Amino acid sequence: DVKVTQSSRYLVKRTGEKVFLECVQDMDHENMFWYRQDPGLGLRLIYFSYDVKMKEKGDIPEGYSVSREKKERFSLILESASTNQTSMYLCASSVRQGAHEQYFGPGTRLTVT
Amino acid sequence: AQSVTQLDSQVPVFEEAPVELRCNYSSSVSVYLFWYVQYPNQGLQLLLKYLSGSTLVESINGFEAEFNKSQTSFHLRKPSVHISDTAEYFCAVGENSGYSTLTFGKGTMLLVSP
């Protein structure tokens, strides 16, 4: 069974703090993804990575950065958290190319106050 | 660019009634399609997928979806729903090129009441 884990289920941070969200997958997948999920907006892709140290912007990268130093780990960084980044953050992984599903972690609900 | 439209944000039904959740997509190349389900406070779980071959695909818990290329649709159906099917359902489309990214619809909340 594919397992994608995220470091925290719930997180509360203050405006201006630097926030790290960690994601680990155990299936040797090349691709990893970070989404944010907001009511009525569905899932929106922030960044993805198709290999170690490689990254591509998604649809809403502003205010975020990512890091992938090891194949199994993909980190999302909020350099200076703002209240409009309060959201559910979902990590996913998949095989690199072709018609393959993505496997999701349980999500991190981040509240920025 | 691909896009996905889920026409209903919420679908209320009674237990044991049939249900259809609608999904339409647009893409300029061949696609593959997914339905995911999200129970409260959980991540997304794959419900079923269309990659190629038979246009009717089924899940283990009684859901089915039919890929209709001419209507660019991939509607999800279940002949008799249970209370436990209450969840949010997301349709997603991917293209057979590039990095295997998916585009998700905005979701449909299925509310099953007794």
Image (cartoon, rainbow, N blue to C red):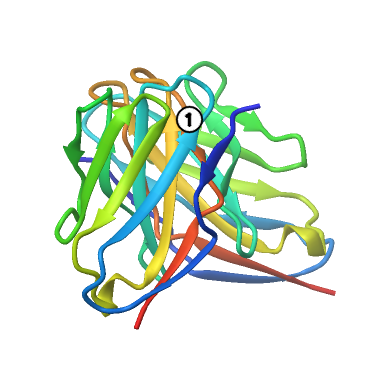
In the depicted structure, whether residue A30 falls above or below residue B60:
above
Please tell me which residue lies in front, A31 or B51: A31
Q: In this view, does A1 lie to the left or right of A97?
A: right
In the depicted structure, whether residue A4 falls above or below residue B8:
above
Residue B50 image position (x, y, % from top left): 51, 28
Q: In which quarter of the image is residue A73?
A: top left
- State the residue at coordinates (18%, 53%): A61
Which residue in the structure is indicated by mark 1?
Answer: A101
Residue A78 image position (x, y, % from top left): 24, 60
Q: In this view, does B62 lie to the left or right of B50?
A: right
Residue A46 image position (x, y, % from top left): 26, 50
Q: Is residue A43 visible?
A: no
Q: In which quarter of the image is the N terminus of chain A?
A: top right
In the depicted structure, whether residue B34 falls above or below residue A51:
below
- State the residue at coordinates (28%, 33%): A68
Disc 1 marks a residue whose amino acid type is Glu
Label 1: state its secondary structure: loop
Callout 1: residue from which chain?
A: A
Q: In this view, does B86 lie to the left or right of A22?
A: right
Residue B38 image position (x, y, % from top left): 59, 55
